[in-house]
Image: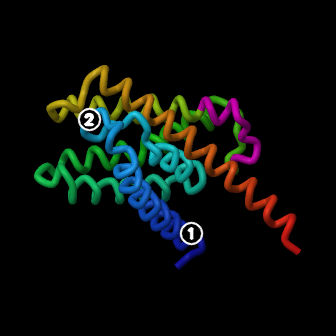
Amino acid sequence: MTKYTTEGLIGIAISANTYALLFYLNDWLTQYVAYGLGVSWIYLPAGLRLFLTLIFGFPGALGIALATFLISYLGVFSQDLVTCIGIAIISGFAPYLARVFVLMNIKIAPDLSDLNFPKLLFCMVIYALFSSGLHQWWFATRGLANTGGINYFIAMFTGDVMGTVLMVTSIKYGLDYLKDFRKIRP
């Protein structure tokens, strides 16, 4: 196996497992602020999806898609394989498309070394637009009752932005804490 294959498989595995874990944790934590099936006012996995695709790129998107397919197929959409595949593709590749769009339209180094807050905020909004727009389009296309429409788009967009802000903030402060912790330990 080549180095790139191993790194890709590791990226897929990390992305699939962390996404699935956070999905179920978020489902439990936000069950009372859910707007509808698959739509929540706070969706922490949105931030993880963006983070994983920014870090791992394509393997991150594949891992998220794999986890989402399994979550959908083993959950409420078990009778509809096509719907599960569509949801998985959108969940995995909406953040990847946002990554590509941002890298092509604003100057960010491919290794993200110059990613600052305004660029990250732009990336978050683009991702939330792609994700919520494509999900709601797919739900409407599939004729899923009580899942598509402008109200669901607004709720999903808000949930994706809120979840992304909370997740990115948590990661940033967690990393800052680790740096400070390492400084005080001999």
Q: Does the magenta stretch include residue 170?
A: no
Q: Which mark is residue 36?
A: 2
Tell me where the magenta segment starts and ends, as one range. 112-122
Instruction: Report the side of 145 relative to 166 (left or right).
Output: left
In front of the other: 128 or 27:
27
Question: For the point 21% across and 29% down, which residue is it?
Answer: 140
Q: Residues within 10 Å of mark 2 (few under 14, many from 20)?
A: some
Instruction: Report the side of 153 relative to 149 (left or right).
Output: right
In front of the other: 137 or 74:
74
Instruction: Report the side of 11 relative to 136 (left or right).
Output: right
Name the N-terminal-most of marks 1 and 2.
Answer: 1
For the residues marked 1 and 2, what is the alpha-carbon distance in whole angstroms?
37 Å
Q: Is residue 113 magenta?
A: yes
Q: Which mark is residue 51?
A: none
> Which amino acid type corresponds to the residue marked 2 in the rendered image?
Gly
The location of residue 1, given as percent across then percent down, is: 52, 79
